[in-house]
């Protein structure tokens, strides 16, 4: 019986002299018996080179030939086609433009698969031909990247995760979450992120949704770094998981919410997270602040005060009355400085009350109050209540207005020790800020006893290296001639245990005690420049000078001092 005339791909193979006619007919018969497309059979039997077969198929069908090796995987349309359809039909979604989706295939005869994808996505599908082996590798790479954050957790990390306890998780969590094994990787992923942040010494975690990406960043040593990019499609499930852990309303996605998570690392160690959600254009951004109670109990020696500065702080804390103000921008460590002072004062003989927005770290033996302006409990209301509670020490989270400032000043003048914060850049600016609020100069001069302005600088790792800086440059930076002549300045190097040469942070402080000379300038309503000049005459180092001392001691780098102390 004569063989039928060759058509389609078979004819192309014969025309291009890739196979003989007899061999093609045998391959067609074998493919038919195995119920496989001819191209698939030829590839499996390695009868034709994969790339040559792809080009022949593309030319025969009039489809573009596509080189996946030159394709940037950052642009792949990851979340358009479900994983099960990608695996089932060996199709790689490439680019989505409006209602059109371009996909790479190796079997153009699979019309059923393309129809299924078209129906599932509601998009117009455009096919391009790709080499089969390269297509399979690229699909696996894409799916591995998608699952990497969830499925490929290391065994030692899984062991750590199994020991975690989260206090806000309900017994009926599976019912709330939707149940099913599909969510288990999300649970593990979120726990892994929390654990990584704790181990890495991060202060904040950012979970951020965007149109074509989902990003997780940690703030470590004051600097944000990207950690991972899970699939965009999993963003809502990550947000729901975090909201459940924080005891938030998971159905509310249009308003910001606040919550807390307590994670037990061991019987004696627990870490609190303050959680806030923010509705954005592409979903809910969630930020977690790590509240490690051990940071409030590290002791004053660990904060980085110079000996004379520490002595002034301790002397002010020992006074029965007066006001200690800690100032600096957000994230400069003001809360830790205040909590350290409160821990020193926290004895059975003292009644200590704090008004905070919100309470970040629980301190046993201290009466802590959450400020809630919506319910009529603002800082001034809390202060009034404290004064009727027989207080010895009062801490106000922040002086924001004239009313709060007036009550705090009166408390400091009537036998109470008051600790608080202001958002100003220097000690002198703090005094003029109180004047601008409307506090009489006489009251400021007689109530404020100590001002601490501070910043946090990254601490150099042990891998630090000495850097050669000309003496003239050091003098221009602010070192004295004597300091510049003997200075040994170090810079970051980088090793396996640090972040680009830095590990941890250290405080840089301007500690100014209000002397009689300063009181005269304040009562004469002198400006911040006059107060700063007087502080220099009295021998108090400003922030810049304190930072340069840290560089001389090899604690931090000159670049880091410039970063945190330059205006």
Image (cartoon, rainbow, N blue to C red):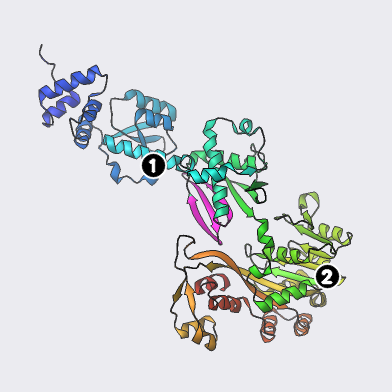
Q: Nearer the viewer, residue 479 or 66?
A: 479
The C terminus appears in which quarter of the rendering? bottom right
In this rendering, which labeled residue sits more in front, label 2 or label 1?
2
**Distance of label 2 from label 1 (alpha carbons):** 63 Å
User: Residue 454, position in %: x, y?
Assistant: 64, 70
Q: Is residue 545 above or below residue 300?
A: below
User: Residue 474, position in %: x, y?
Assistant: 49, 82
Which residue is rendered at x = 82% and y = 57% of the image?
Answer: 382
- The residue at the far top in this view is 1
The residue beneath circle 1 is: 76
SS type, badge 2: helix
Magenta-highlighted residues: 200-227
Whether residue 36 can be seen here: yes
Circle 2 residues within 10 Å: few <14, some 14–19, many ≥20: many
Q: Nearer the viewer, residue 323 or 47?
A: 47
Q: Quadrant of residue 369?
A: bottom right
Whether residue 567 can be seen here: no
User: Residue 159, position in %: x, y?
Assistant: 54, 43
The residue beneath circle 2 is: 412
Circle 1 residues within 10 Å: few <14, some 14–19, many ≥20: some
């Amino acid at each position: 019986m004569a063989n039928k005339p060759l058509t389609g791909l078979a004819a192309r193979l014969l025309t291009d002299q890739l196979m003989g006619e007899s061999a093609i007919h045998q391959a067609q018969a074998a493919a038919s018996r195995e119920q496989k497309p001819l191209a698939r059979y030829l590839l499996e039997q390695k009868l034709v080179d994969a790339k040559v077969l792809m080009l022949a198929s593309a030319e025969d069908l009039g489809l573009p030939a596509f080189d996946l090796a030159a394709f940037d995987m950052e642009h792949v349309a990851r979340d358009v086609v479900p994983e099960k359809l990608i695996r089932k039909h060996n199709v790689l979604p490439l680019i989505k433009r409006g209602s059109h989706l371009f996909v790479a295939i190796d079997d153009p005869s699979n019309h059923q698969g393309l129809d299924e994808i078209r129906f599932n996505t509601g998009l117009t599908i455009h096919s391009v031909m790709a080499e089969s082996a390269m297509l399979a590798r690229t699909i696996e790479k894409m799916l591995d990247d998608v699952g990497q954050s969830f499925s490929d957790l290391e065994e030692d990390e899984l062991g750590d995760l199994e020991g975690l306890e989260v206090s806000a998780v309900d017994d009926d969590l599976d019912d709330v979450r939707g149940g099913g094994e599909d969510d288990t990787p999300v649970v593990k992923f979120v726990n892994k992120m929390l654990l990584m942040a704790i181990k890495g010494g991060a202060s904040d975690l950012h979970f951020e949704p965007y149109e074509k990406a989902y990003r997780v960043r940690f703030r470590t040593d004051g600097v944000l770094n990207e950690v991972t990019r899970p699939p965009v499609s999993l963003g809502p499930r990550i947000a729901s998981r975090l909201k459940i852990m924080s005891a938030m309303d998971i159905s509310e996605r249009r308003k910001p919410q606040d919550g807390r998570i307590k994670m037990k690392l061991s019987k004696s160690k627990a870490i609190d997270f303050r959680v806030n959600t923010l509705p954005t254009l592409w979903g809910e951004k969630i930020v977690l602040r790590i509240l490690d109670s051990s940071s409030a109990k590290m002791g004053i020696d660990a904060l980085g005060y110079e000996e004379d500065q520490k002595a002034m702080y301790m002397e002010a804390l020992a006074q029965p009355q007066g006001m200690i103000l800690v100032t600096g921008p957000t994230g400069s460590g003001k809360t830790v400085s205040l909590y350290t002072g409160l821990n020193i004062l926290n004895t059975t003989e003292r009644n200590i009350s704090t008004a905070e927005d919100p309470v970040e770290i629980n301190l046993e033996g201290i009466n802590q109050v959450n400020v809630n302006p919506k319910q009529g409990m603002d800082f001034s209301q809390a202060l009034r209540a404290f004064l009727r509670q027989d207080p010895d020490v009062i801490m106000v989270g922040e002086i924001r207005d004239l009313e709060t400032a007036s009550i705090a000043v009166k408390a400091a003048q009537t036998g109470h020790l008051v600790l608080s914060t202001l958002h100003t850049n220097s000690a002198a600016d703090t005094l003029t800020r109180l004047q601008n609020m409307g506090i009489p100069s006489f009251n400021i001069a007689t109530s404020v006893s100590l001002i601490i302005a501070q910043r946090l600088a990254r601490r150099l790792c042990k891998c630090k290296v000495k850097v050669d800086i000309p003496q003239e440059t050091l003098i221009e930076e602010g070192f004295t001639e004597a300091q510049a002549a003997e200075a040994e300045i170090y810079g970051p190097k980088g090793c396996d245990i640090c972040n680009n040469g830095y590990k941890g942070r250290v405080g840089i402080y301007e500690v100014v005690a209000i002397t009689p000379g300063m009181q005269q300038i304040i009562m004469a309503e002198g400006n911040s420049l006059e107060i700063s000049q007087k502080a220099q005459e009295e021998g108090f180092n400003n922030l810049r000078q304190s930072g340069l001392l840290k560089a001389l001691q090899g604690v931090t780098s000159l670049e880091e001092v410039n970063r945190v102390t330059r205006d």
